[in-house]
Image (spheres, coloured by chain):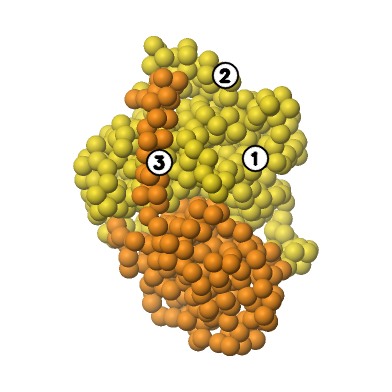
Amino acid sequence: MARNIIEKIWDEHKVADLDDGSTLLYIDRVFLHERTGSIALKGLEASGRQVRNPEQVFCAMDHIVDTFPGRTDETVMPGGKAFITTTREAAHAAGITLFDLGDERQGIVHVVSPEQGIAYPGVTLVCPDSHTCTQGAVGALAWGIGSTEAEHAMATKTLVVRKPKTMRISFDGQLPPGVTAKDMILHLIGVHTAAGGVGYAIEFAGEAVRNLPMEARFTLCNMAVEFGAWTGLIAPDPNTFDYVRGRPYAPDEAHWEVARENWQSLVSDPGAVFDKEIRIDVADIVPQVTWGTSPQHTVGIDGQVPDPAMETDLNRRQLMQNALAYMELEPGMPMEGIPIEAAFIGSCTNSRLSDLRNAAAILKGRTVAAGVKAIVVPGSGLVKKAAEAEGLDKIFTAAGFEWRESGCSMCFFAGGENFGLETRVISSTNRNFENRQGPRTRTHIASPTTVAASAVAGELTDVRKLAAQ
Amino acid sequence: MMDKFTTLNSIAAPMRRLNIDTDIIIPSREMKRVSKKGLSEGLFAGWRYTTPGGREENPDFILNQAPYRDSQILLAGGNFGCGSSREHAVWALHEWGIRCIIAPSFGAIFQGNCVRNGILPVVLDDDIVQSMADHVTVNPAHNRIRVDLDSCTVTAPDGETYGFEIAAGDRRMLLEGLDAIAVTLQRDDEILEFQARDRLRRPWVYL
C-alpha cells in the first residue's frame, strides 16, 4: 500500500500499538538546552532514573547564555547562571554530550544538531523546545515536547504518541526574486492561520521546496509550529545527502552507502494519501512582514495594515483589534515606511551562514539609519567562524550592526537584555507575540534581507528595491 | 505523583482570545529558577499586573476579579497554549489552581503537558464554548460548570451536557494519577527487543 514519508518513518519506529490507538514510538535522539533541559535532567535525577542511552542525548547552551563578546556563566538575565551551571552539572552526571560555552560547536540547538550531523534522514528526534520541527528539513521526524516528556524519552528511549493526521503542502513554481523561505512560510500562515496545521504532521513538497538550498529548508520547517502543526519535514534528496555526509555524528563512511540506500526510500510513494493537501503558487508570494501579534498577522511589504472591520470571523476580528492596539498601528497604513527603532538578525529561524551572507549582501557599502539599534547573532560558533572567514562580520560592523556570540539572544526576553519599552523592532525571528522580545516591544517579523534593508532605511522597506540598486 | 482528576464542579473564567500563547500564560522573564514550583505568581503576568515586571494587580484582568479568582476552569479560545514548549505554562496554571481548560483546539505540546500534570484539556466546538462563556458571564458564582472524566462529559450552567473525546491512555493517566514512565517501563522487554532488532537494521544510528 502506498505510504507517505511520515507514515514510513512512523512505522519504522513503532515499538508497539497501544490499546487506545496511540503508538509507543522509538526515539533515536534527544536534544536538550539549559532552559527546559535542566529541569528534565534534574527531574530524572530526582526520580532515581537514568538516561538509557546517554550517547544519543545531546545538550546545547543557547537560551539563557549572554551573546556579548567575552561572555561567561554570568548573565544579564537575573538568576541565569543557575540554569547554566545546573545544566552543566546534570549533563556531566548523566554522561550526555554537552556543547558548552567556550566550545566552537555551541549554538542554537536547531542550528547545532543538523550542523553536527545529529539530525539526519529518517531519525526520530525530540527536544523540549517547540522549534524542534526545524530539523525536519533533513528528512527527520523531529518535534517539540515538554520537559516531562523529555524525561520519558531519556529514561525509556520511547514516547507515547498519538498518530497525527498528515498534510502535504506543495509550493509550486519558481520563487520570484527577493522572496525567501521565510516569506513562503509566513504567507502560508497568513492565508491558513496560526491554527491551520493543528493536529497535522506536514510534508513540505513541490518545485519551490525542491529548489530551496538546505539552509533555507530549515527556515521553512522552523515555523511549522507557528502554523500549529505537530511538525513538518522535507523528503531527503541528493542535496540532503551532500549536506549530511562527513558531519561529526552522521553515519561514518563504513555505513554511508547502506544508510543512503535506506534514506532513498524516504519519499512519499506515488498515490500516497494525505489527510489534507494545500497547494500554493509561489509566484503569488511577495516579501512578507508581520503587522500584529500572531504570525498569522502577516502581509506583503507592498500592502497595508488590514482593517478588522473587513474580517467576518468575530474571534479573528477581536484578535486583530487587540493586535493593532498593542502594535500602535491603524488600519490602512502602508507597511512600507513604518519607522523602526531596532533590527535583529538571528534565531533558529534565520541565523545560518546563508542568512548572514544574504543580509550582508544588502548591507555592503550601506549603513544602518541613525538611531536604529542593530544586532546580528550567528546561530552557532561554527557559523560565526565561517562568516568571519569570509569577512561578513566586517560588513555587518561597518554597517553599524553589533556582531555577537551565538545563542537565542533577543528572540525572546527572559528578564535580561531587551530592546526597551515599546520599541519597534524588525526581526528575523519567528514570534511576534506580545512582550516576546521585551516589555511591550512591537515586533515585525520578516526575512533577514528585509530586516537588513529596513535597518538601512530606518523604516519597513521592500528589499526588492534595495537589491535592484 | 501527579494529582488525580475525576470530577470538577467549578466557577469558570472565559478567556476567549484566539491563539493565547505560552509566552502570555507565563512570560519567559517569570521563569526565574530551575524549578517547577513558584511559578503561579508569573501566571499571565503581562496581563495580570499593571506594569511589566510589576506586581500591582490590573483590575481589568479577569482572574483578578471576584469570583473568577476561584476559577478552576478556563473557557478558552482556539489554539490555546500555542507557541513555546515551556511546561512552566502548565505548572503555573496548576499552581494557581486551574484543573481543566475547555477550548476548541490546543497547541499540541501544551495539550500533552496538561495531561502529564493533572490538568484536563477538553476540546469542544467553538460555539459550545462560547455559549458556556455567555452563561457563565451572567452569574459566574452561580453558573458553574461540571466536568466528569469518568463519563467524559461537560455539563453547562443551563444543564446541557456535552460529551468529549480523550485518548484512553491520557484519561487513565489523569484518573489514576499515573507515572507515565513507570507505565511505559512495563513494556521494557518490548523496547529492548525493538532496539536489538533496530541495531541490526539501522546500525548507523547507533553511536
Classed neighbour count for the residue bearing mark 1: other residues with Cα under 10 Å, few (<14), some (14–19), many (≥20): many
Viewer-proximal residue, A33 or A28?
Answer: A28
Q: Are marks 2 and 1 in contact (CB under 8 Å)?
A: no
Q: Position of residue A393 (x, y in %)?
A: 40, 34
Q: Amino acid at mark 3?
A: Arg
Q: Amino acid at mark 1?
A: Thr
Q: Could you say which chain is coloured orange in the image?
A: B
Q: Quadrant of the N terminus of chain A?
A: top right
Viewer-proximal residue, B58 or A378?
Answer: B58
Of label 2 and label 1, which has the lower sequence position? Answer: 1
Is residue A209 found left or right of A421 in the rendered image?
Answer: right
Q: Could you say which chain is coloured yellow in the image?
A: A
Q: Return the mark for residue A264.
A: 2
Helix, strand or loop status at disc 1: strand
Q: Return the mark for residue A166.
A: 1
On screen, residue A282 above or below A389: below
Q: Chain of mark 2?
A: A
